[in-house]
Image (tube, rainbow, N blue to C red):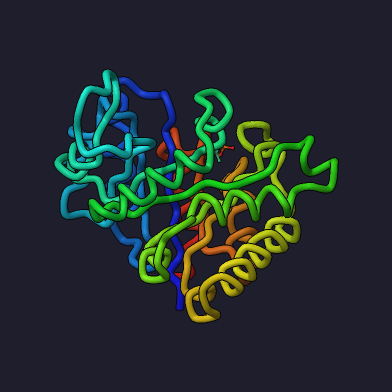
Amino acid sequence: MRRKLIAGNWKMNKITTEAIELANGLKRELYKIDDVDIVVCPPFTSLEEVSEIIYESNIKLGAQNMHWEDNGAFTGEIAPAMLKDLGCKFVILGHSERRQYFHETNEIVNKKTKAALKHNLTPIVCVGETLQEREAGKAFDVIQDHVYNSLEGLTSEETDEVIIAYEPVWAIGTGKTATPEQAQEVHHFIRGLLKKKYSEELAEAIIILYGGSVKPANTKELVGQKDIDGALVGGASLEIKSFSEIVKNASIS
Ligand code: PEP
């Protein structure tokens, strides 16, 4: 039985004092939740402070990106061990904003995914089509390309550790959410791809999140779909109230 997971991607928001306030508020609101995994992904600059606040709580820490090399002359980059050192357990990779604005390709996402696994960080690998691609009838081809090529060369044991986030680009930060049926269709398709490449057992075990304008009001219906195991939340993860409500709505207790 797959557990639900709700992850908040704070993106390039919150200076450290604000991050501290948000983390403290979430800890206060969510300490009773035990049937949903909760992850927050602050910017690099407040990982340490948030890590201290959520230490030994039911909230886990993630980062929003990292480099694939262990160390070296990569000015401005962050290595996997640096994230581990600060208490990160998760790292978002291949977010569409990274693919779009920083030209991250599947090949780069693949290198980062392998590096995360090598360092015992759980990669949250983002996949998803643009509006243009959906309208051209290419959504499923794009998703297949993202899934297969981002995970290229991973053993089934490694793939089993990966979390996939289906985030249609047209639904990110736009207020347009995929309908639960649209999202379910893609999640089912992704499980089918994994079944074809690995096994039915792996396809059934892997966690697949939906992302794209998730709000308290649409959480229950989205995470209630058979193949949707939770959400990657952007905008609504920036407020104590909305993120806590999303987590509570994903909880069955
Ligand atoms: C995201 O960026 O991962 C995301 C899903 O953003 P939003 O919830 O704001 O659409």
Q: Is residue 242 visible?
A: no
Residue drawn where x is 45% and y is 53% of the image: 6
Q: Residue 3's x, y, as percent? A: 43, 69
Q: Is residue 112 above or below residue 197?
A: above
Q: Quadrant of residue 214?
A: top right
Residue 198, x across and y down, in percent = 51, 73
Residue 37 occupies which quadrant of the picture?
bottom left
**Where is 222 relative to 215, above or below?**
below
Residue at position x 54%, y 51% in the image: 149
Q: Nearer the viewer, residue 174 or 190?
A: 190
**Residue situated in front as seen by the camera: 227 or 130:** 130
In the depicted structure, whether residue 69 falls above or below residue 143: above
- Judging depth in this view, the residue of 251 and 185 nearest the camera is 185
Q: Among all residues in the image, which is located at the extreme right?
A: 136
Say which of 227 and 206 sits in front.
206
Quarter holding residue 172: top right
* Left or right: 196, with 160 as reference point: right
What residue do we see at 61% from left, 42% from top?
A: 212
Dividing the image into four quarters, tell me where ligand 1 lies. top right
**Residue in the image at 72% along x and 52% along y:** 141
- The image shows residue 207 at horizontal and vertical percentages of 48, 64
Q: Where's the N terminus, which quadrant?
A: bottom left
State whether residue 133 appears in this view: yes
Question: Position of 206 compared to 193: left or right?
Answer: left
Number of marks: 0
